[in-house]
Image (cartoon, rainbow, N blue to C red):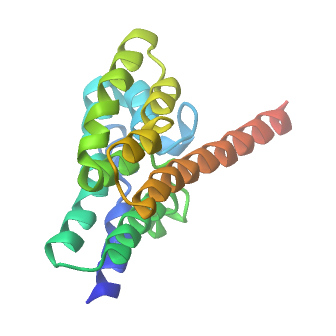
Amino acid sequence: MSWLILVAGYLVGALPTAYIAGRWQRGLDIRQLGDGNMGARNAYYQLGHRTGVTIFIVDVLKGSAPVLLAQSLGLPQGFVLAAGLATVIGHNWPVFIHFRGGRGEATTIGVFLALLTQPMLIVAGPALATLLLRRNVIAASCVLFVPLPLVCWWLGLTPLLIGYSVALPVLVGLTHYQRTRQVSRASAGAT
């Protein structure tokens, strides 16, 4: 049963919400629009504000659902954490569209809201203020993810959860870096 939760987490994460919205709304591949990312931010700018916000909410729910399911089944914490990781991996490398997905920010937020609810609520205010004032998702993500391990430590969470609060954002950052380099190389090759 535990392994099925990991597979389910991956498959839930792999549901390409921005891709589906782009195809359904405009008959276009979101990966061919804007910055080429298959995430809520690109959808917000390329498909409209409502669509982008809806995709963000769905991606957050995709992150939360497998973690909450694993917790409700009473699985050991290691499997709960693995379910969250599998979901982010599914979002970033979805089997349904040739392993080219998003960066995993919204999905990671969903995992953390289910797993680290109190720390996330503490850092959410400043992150939201940064997003509204600067209109910069990357800056808001930094304000959300960078202090999160410190808040987890301050609240007395276990070292495993503190490490996890570092690991998932590092995965998001590495994915962002990799995708940005790919876009830069493609742009340089086109000129």
Query: Considering only vertical position in the picture, is 91 above or below 123?
Result: below
Query: Which residue is pictured at 46% across the width and 32% down the height?
Result: 141
Above or below — where is 92 with respect to 37? below
Task: Write the residue at 54% across / 65% down.
Answer: 98
Residue 149: horizontal and vertical position, in percent?
46, 45
For the C terminus, the quadrant is top right
Visible residue check, residue 55: no
Residue 187: name its quadrant. Answer: top right
Residue 173: % across, % down: 59, 44
**Looking at the picture, how far across and down is residue 159, in whole percent?**
45, 60
Q: Residue furthest top?
A: 133
Residue 180 placement: quadrant: top right
Towards the viewer: 34 or 128: 128
Using the image as rendered, state which of residue 97 and residue 140 is in the foreground.
140
Q: Depth check: 128 or 10 in front?
A: 128
Residue at left 20%, top 64%? 68
Specify the quadrant that holds the N terminus: bottom left
The reply to whether residue 85 is in sight is yes
> How many numbered discs sit on the rendered protein?
0
Which residue reaches farthest left?
A: 72
Snapshot quadrant of residue 55: top left
x, y percent for residue 181:
74, 42
